[in-house]
Image (tube, rainbow, N blue to C red):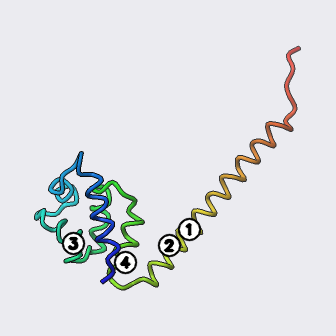
């Protein structure tokens, strides 16, 4: 089993420790047993893909990143890489679209005829 998820969880839970207990994380994620979070961070159990959406906000992390880590733990590294490539392509398209929009607005403000008061 890939240990990236367990490592990520250990780090994130430690970062949240000053403001949020492991028990609170478990409760916010909908786990009835707080030990579930311990088992996840130790790599003793896998994070079910259908639990990612509930756990991500409890950990205050991006659900997409957590989902990719969960895919890796199940041995779906190829699928995870493909999804990551798709996410990156979408992000690049959005970034380019936003950049073009800013450029167009800049050009428009520089070339628009100014109105004068009569």
- Closer to the chain start, of discs 4 and 3, is 3
**Image point (31%, 67%), residue name:** 52
Q: Secondary structure at mark 2?
A: helix
Q: Which mark is residue 71?
A: 4
Rendering coords of residue 92 (x, y %): 62, 63
Cα separation between marks 2 and 3: 25 Å
**Which of label 2 and label 3 is nearer to you?**
3
Q: Within 10 angstroms of label 3, few (less than 14), some, or many (20 or more) residues?
A: some
Rendering coords of residue 82 (x, y %): 51, 79
Q: Secondary structure at mark 4?
A: helix
Question: What residue would you read off at disc 3?
Answer: 42
Q: Within 10 angstroms of label 1, few (less than 14), some, or many (20 or more) residues?
A: few
**Image point (52%, 68%), residue name:** 87
Position of the N terminus, as image quadrant, is bottom left
- Position of residue 26 in the picture relative to residue 81 (left or right): left
- Closer to the chain start, of discs 2 and 3, is 3
Question: What residue would you read off at disc 1?
Answer: 88
Q: Are marks 2 and 3 in contact (CB under 8 Å)?
A: no
Cα separation between marks 2 and 4: 11 Å
Question: What residue would you read off at disc 2?
Answer: 84
- Closer to the chain start, of discs 1 and 3, is 3
Cα separation between marks 1 and 2: 6 Å
- Closer to the chain start, of discs 1 and 4, is 4
Rendering coords of residue 111 (x, y %): 86, 38
Q: Nearer the viewer, residue 78 or 94?
A: 78
Cα separation between marks 1 and 4: 17 Å
- Position of residue 18 in the picture relative to residue 8 (left or right): left
Q: Are marks 1 and 2 in contact (CB under 8 Å)?
A: yes
């Amino acid at each position: 089993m890939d240990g990236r998820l367990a490592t990520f969880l250990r780090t994130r839970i430690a970062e949240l420790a000053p403001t949020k207990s492991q028990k609170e994380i478990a409760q916010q994620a909908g786990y009835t047993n707080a030990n579930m979070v311990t088992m996840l961070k130790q790599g003793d159990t896998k994070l079910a893909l259908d639990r990612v959406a509930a756990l991500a906000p409890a950990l205050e992390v991006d659900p997409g990143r957590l989902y990719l880590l969960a895919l890796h733990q199940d041995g779906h590294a190829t699928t995870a890489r493909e999804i990551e490539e798709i996410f990156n392509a979408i992000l690049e398209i959005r970034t380019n679209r936003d950049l073009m929009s800013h450029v167009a607005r800049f050009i428009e403000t520089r070339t628009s005829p100014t109105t004068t008061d009569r």
